[in-house]
């Protein structure tokens, strides 16, 4: 994006770049949380859920690419050191110390809800001012909402499976 393009945004570009660097940090942490959790996960429906979590991980990585490109277009510098990711992120990274499928899914659900809030804030901040960033934020937001729904559906399926098993035992 050229200088004139940035100048006409009528937005605090410095604040926007900070918000985007925070989002970038969260995307990298989300990517790794999905990726490693999928690899370590144990329990019911693992074979169905694992490939989907790896798709989610790839989508988080794609979000990072979009965000870093936008930071550069705006004249900013993306976060350069991975050790800064946890400092900039308000979304927690929860190590998958308990590999049980429900634990992994709940950790990812927490991360998705944090990401939903982040991209809503970026979309609101840029609405009517920076159409390119706004469109990017709403596109990512829609994918994060889909991820949340996927995880909620899997958790519901697991709960129903557990209820069905209780009925069989009785």
Image (tube, grey):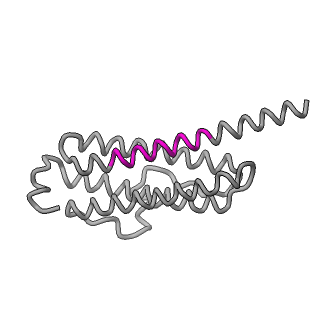
Is 67 displayed left or right of 30 in the figure? left
- 72 and 142: which is toward the camera: 142
Q: Main secondary structure of the magenta part?
A: helix
Q: Quadrant of residue 160?
A: top right
Q: Residue at x 26, y 56 (%)?
A: 17
- 86 and 119: which is toward the camera: 119
| Quadrant of the image containing the N terminus | bottom left
Where is 33 relative to 12, above or below? below
- 75 and 44: which is toward the camera: 44
Is 117 displayed left or right of 54 in the figure? left
Toward the right, the furthest residue is 170
Magenta segment: does it hold 87? Answer: no
Which residues are drawn in magenta? 137-153
The percent coordinates of residue 109 (x first, y second) are: 55, 44
The percent coordinates of residue 163 (x first, y second) are: 78, 33
Q: Residue at x 31, y 55 (%)?
A: 20
The percent coordinates of residue 93 (x first, y second) are: 53, 55
| Quadrant of the image containing the C terminus | top right
Is 104 displayed left or right of 164 in the figure? left
Q: Residue at x 20, y 47 (%)?
A: 130
Q: Quadrant of residue 35?
A: bottom right
Is 96 displayed left or right of 126 in the figure? right
The percent coordinates of residue 61 (x first, y second) are: 45, 61
Q: Residue at x 75, y 48 (%)?
A: 44
- The total number of labels drawn is 0
Magenta segment: does it hold 149? Answer: yes
Toward the bottom, the furthest residue is 81
Where is 79 relative to 56, above or below? below
């Amino acid at each position: 994006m050229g200088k004139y393009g940035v100048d006409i945004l009528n937005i605090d570009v410095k604040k926007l770049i900070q918000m985007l660097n925070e989002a970038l940090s969260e995307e990298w942490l989300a990517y790794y949380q999905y990726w490693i959790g999928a690899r370590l996960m144990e329990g019911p429906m693992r074979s169905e859920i694992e490939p989907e979590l790896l798709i989610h991980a790839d989508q988080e990585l794609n979000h990072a690419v979009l965000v870093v490109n936008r930071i550069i277009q705006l004249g900013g510098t993306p976060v350069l050191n991975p050790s800064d990711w946890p400092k900039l992120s308000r979304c927690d990274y929860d190590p998958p110390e308990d590999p049980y499928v429900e634990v992994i899914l709940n950790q990812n659900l927490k991360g998705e809800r944090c990401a939903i809030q982040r991209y809503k804030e970026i979309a609101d901040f840029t609405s009517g001012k920076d159409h390119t960033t706004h469109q990017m934020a709403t596109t990512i937001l829609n994918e994060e909402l889909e991820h949340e729904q996927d995880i909620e559906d899997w958790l519901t399926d697991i709960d129903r499976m557990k209820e069905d098993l209780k009925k069989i035992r009785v």
